[in-house]
Image (tube, grey):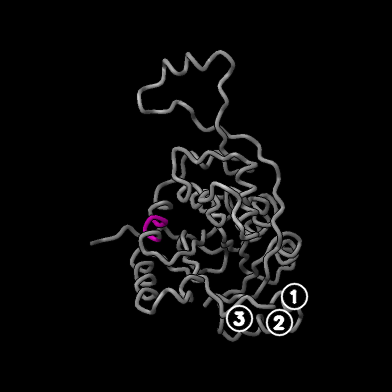
Amino acid sequence: MTLASVAKRMLGKTGIEVSVLGLGAGPLGCARLDDGAALALVASALDRGVTLFDTAPSYGSSAATVGRDDILGELDRAKVAGKIRASGYPGGNEALAAAVSSGQFDVIECSVSPFDRGSLGGSVATAAAAGMGVLAKRTLGNAAWRFESAPGAPDVRQYWERARAMAIDPAPLAWPELALRVAAFADGVSTALVGTASTAHLADACAAVARPARGEERCRRGTVRRRRSPRPGREDEEAQAKPEGRSRQSPTCQRAPPIDTPAPPAYVVGAM
């Protein structure tokens, strides 16, 4: 069977062509995923045209080392020697802005999702204008929509609280598709990363970014989709006009409150 190939974009001005969707490889190291399943996942990604895999030995305490002159010097020497083609910095907030303005990096990686758009009008726009590649991570916002009540994990709970406060309506798309498309088609983003251990979920993610940008494009510039509240006296009129089995409520774009994204541990990455 021939699979539709994920579209490609240039990773800033690095000269590296990457797929619009990248595979976050964290699940590949999960104990519940055996070698056979891990290899099948990678093969499935390659078959669908995914060419970017985001991986690292560990994130650890590397935040303390990023920005040291000796580390930056080693990166420069590695590029001159041809050992790496590009260097990147993942982070958020002031640290990300500093990395972008330093001129030392070719790529940045930051959180982008319907619930996490604080970097789009700042560091992402600045990086893209400077010719840097941009990788969008945490594109699903920890799939906070799965929970009816506040989850226990602090990072998931944070996204859940944001989602509740923003009252986003994903219709007519399903949540995973909307979240991925918001990130993949955001201005300045080169690749949207998704972490999964499931080949079926990977196939769904590839299909989600395969279609051209449409409704979510109107909502990505600092706005979110919310349902309109019917005007007083219109409920009965709308009920009579509504076709059976189909809702007439349509999403509208409204300004969302700004969201400050806590900076995750930072590390240095190299693209081969």
Residue 159 left/right relative to 238: right
**Disc on res. 67:** 1
Between label 3 and label 1, give the one nearer the viewer.
Answer: 1
Residue 94 left/right relative to 25: right
The residue at 51%/59% (across/down) is: 192
Q: Is residue 225 above or below residue 182?
A: above
Q: Amino acid at mark 2?
A: Ile
Q: Is residue 61 above or below residue 3?
A: below
Report helix, strand or loop for mark 3.
Answer: helix
Q: Amino acid at mark 3?
A: Lys
Distance in Å between CA atoms under marks 3 and 1: 17 Å
Q: Amino acid at mark 1?
A: Gly
Q: Quadrant of residue 88?
A: bottom right
The residue at 51%/62% (across/down) is: 193
Mark 2 in CB contact with mark 1 (< 8 angstroms): yes
Residue 34 point in image, percent of width and height: 39, 77
Q: Which residue is the site of mark 2?
A: 71
Q: Main secondary structure of the magenta part?
A: helix
Distance in Å between CA atoms under marks 3 and 2: 13 Å
Between label 3 and label 2, give the one nearer the viewer.
Answer: 2
- Circle 1 packing at 10 Å, graded few (<14), some (14-19), many (20+), is some
Residue 263 point in image, percent of width and height: 70, 63
Residue 265 point in image, percent of width and height: 68, 70
The residue at 61%/67% (across/down) is: 107
Residue 225 left/right relative to 31: right
Label whose residue precedes the other's in the sequence (3 or 1): 1
Q: Which residue is the site of mark 3?
A: 79
The quarter of the image holding the N terminus is bottom left
